[in-house]
Image (cartoon, grey):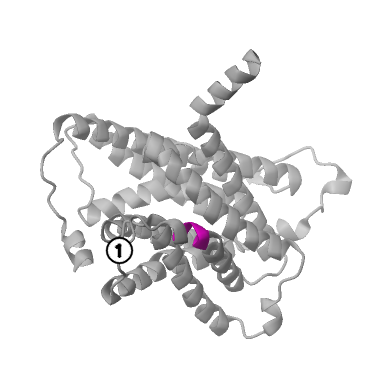
Amino acid sequence: MKIIEGFMVTLERNKPYVAMIFIQFVYSGMALLSKAAISKGMSPYVFVVYRQAFATLALSPFAYFDSKHATPLSCNLLCKLFLVSLVGLTASSNLYYVSINYTTATFAAAATNTVPAITFIMAVLIRVESISIKRIHGVAKILGSIISLVGAITLALVKGPSLHYMIPENQKYISQSLTMVHSKGDSVKGSLMMLSGNTSWSLWLILQGFIVKQYPAKFRLITIQCFFSFIQSAILAAAMERNLSAWRLGWDIHLLAVAYCGVIVTGICYWLQVCAIESKGPVFTAMFTPLSLIITATISSLLWKEPLYWGSIGGTILLVIGLYSLLWGKNKESAKVENHEEGQPKQETRLECIIQN
């Protein structure tokens, strides 16, 4: 009994760590399953429609009970949510799933590590984030952003020789459709589209900080945006996919992938991330992002025989170094702000004024 009690106490104390490790496994599954579904012929535009539909249904029960922070929805706020959904959820999701057809699941997981750096650069440009080059944390944030961008460019444009695995002859063509080789032009196009999707997602993250001040009911907020994204994506998919057979779902990898991404990724992981952020902060959650890359690369190499290239490895290393440099600088800056600037009135940025009006 004492062993069991000790185990439960340890588990309770380390819940945020367990939750974040679980989330990274889930995100790895998202990259792997979505790559498999689209490689098997599913339209990426239709994929986004079904994912947002499943996400809306999964979040609706939580949104129904999230009433203590709910405020009346004005027409002005609904218009803002519609535009934010278009910029963030719809644009980033469609770019992600179209580009994954030209890249690999490993690249998709690696490209996710550019989001903190892109978000930081955009926040600086619109004066939401500040930089102090006279302090070590400011230099760390700048260097981290530059290293991350260099890593992203290396990952997108530099391939280099491949790493050869000891693969038996009778397994060399297993899951060939999942590891099909694209031309260099297609690979570059897919990489740029993936980075564009991450840029759109970064802008969405910044805008959420302003929107949530006007509508604090977080679950209702994300549910409404998923619903708007579902409508927008359906219109886009109807224009891009005229073949009705492309919309058919069977009991196969297509249904599994969209249900997994909509219900587990958007529904369950959203809950877990909110809990982890509340207990440990956003920097803690971002530190686990490279774990998803390691898991995805390992599973892709072993299960699908997906090749790894030295250029991709070098770019990934730069991405991870830049990410942790940026997070370290941000963490140090946050600590200094809490110690020395607590209680000072916060000046509204120009973007905040625009969003609120």
- Left/right placement of residue 78 relative to residue 42 reads left
At 55% across and 50% down in the image, what residue appears?
268
Q: Nearer the viewer, residue 115 or 224?
A: 224
188 within the magenta span: no
- Left/right placement of residue 118 relative to residue 105 reads left
The residue most toward the right is 170
Is residue 110 something one can see in this rendering?
yes
Is residue 151 something one can see in this rendering?
no
What percent of the width, then of the height, locates residue 214?
A: 26, 61
Helix, strand or loop at label 1? It is: loop
- Left/right placement of residue 195 relative to residue 216 reads right
The N terminus - image quarter: top right
What percent of the width, then of the height, locates residue 128?
A: 22, 52
Vertical order, 202 against 117 (above or below): below
Picture quadrant where residue 250 is located = bottom right
Picture quadrant where residue 165 is located = top right
> Which amino acid type is shown beneath numbered disc 1?
Thr
Q: Which residue bears the numbered disc 1?
A: 71
Q: Nearer the viewer, residue 194 or 167?
A: 194
Q: Residues within 10 Å of mark 1 (few under 14, many from 20)?
A: few
Main structural element of the magenta stretch: helix, strand or loop? Answer: helix
What percent of the width, then of the height, locates residue 313?
A: 56, 40
Vertical order, 130 against 199 (above or below): above
The C terminus - image quarter: bottom left
* Magenta extent: 59-63
At 31% across and 34% down in the image, what residue appears?
331
At 44% across and 39% down in the image, what residue appears?
276
What percent of the width, then of the height, locates residue 115?
A: 41, 50
At 77% across and 57% down in the image, what residue appears?
176
